[in-house]
Amino acid sequence: KASYTTRQVQLGWQNDIRVGPGTATLGMETLEQRIASSEDYPVKQRRINSLLGGYLVKLGDWNLQANVRNDDNSQFGNHTSGQAGASWQFLPAWQAGGNIGTGFRAPSFNDLYFPDDGYGNKGNPNLQPEKSLNREVFVRYRQDGLQAGLTLFRNRVSNLIEWAPVDPNDTWGPWQPSNVG
């Protein structure tokens, strides 16, 4: 019987500082991931070092926010993502706004290296990280304990990681994590 032990050690620091009319956020984080297994994993550890910053400000009826994050992944390299958004309180109970942001997600050790389960289902060491562009606009109502909202969004993900058949013409055959879309 196979055994797996995954260990993560994470250390983070975040500081919120009043700057002018808003709040600046600065932070850093380090994450070390290790796997020990009775099965052979070609890569058994990785480290992700991250820096982040943001600013949130309220100017009259407007809220503005911007954030940026950089992740240096020992296995997948350096990636920067960010987000910007604004909302407008156009009536006491009504708010409208929008956001745009980018994202990055590295495959897990199991996505990459999980051993064959005896039926051909296994990890895929050729996976690429997911990247995304996310946009949304919204309108919200909040008064006297009643809340309602409408959000329109579009998320475009490249290299989406999803379990898929190894042979697209044989859905009964073996499956593995794959980059789709």
Image: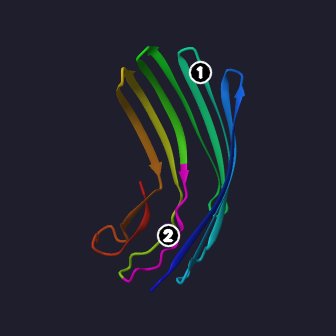
Q: Residues within 10 Å of mark 1 (few under 14, many from 20)?
A: some
Where is mark 2, residue-wise? 110
Residue 110 in magenta? yes
Q: Residue at x 64, y 66 (%)?
A: 46
Q: Position of residue 92 (x, y in %)?
A: 43, 14
Q: Residue at x 66, y 25 (%)?
A: 22
- Residue 168 is drawn in which quadrant? bottom left
Mark 2, secondary structure of its residue: helix
Quadrant location, the C terminus: bottom left
Distance in Å between CA atoms under marks 1 and 2: 43 Å
> Residue 57: image x %, image y %?
62, 24
The answer to which of 143 and 108 lies nearer the viewer is: 143
Q: Residue at x 51, y 34 (%)?
A: 100
Location of mark 1 (residue): 58
What residue is rendered at 34% in x and 71% in y?
A: 167
Residue type, mark 1 in image: Lys
Can you give x and y, in whole percent of width and height, for residue 38 in the image? 53, 84
- Give the quarter of the figure containing the N terminus: bottom left
Q: Is residue 21 visible?
A: yes
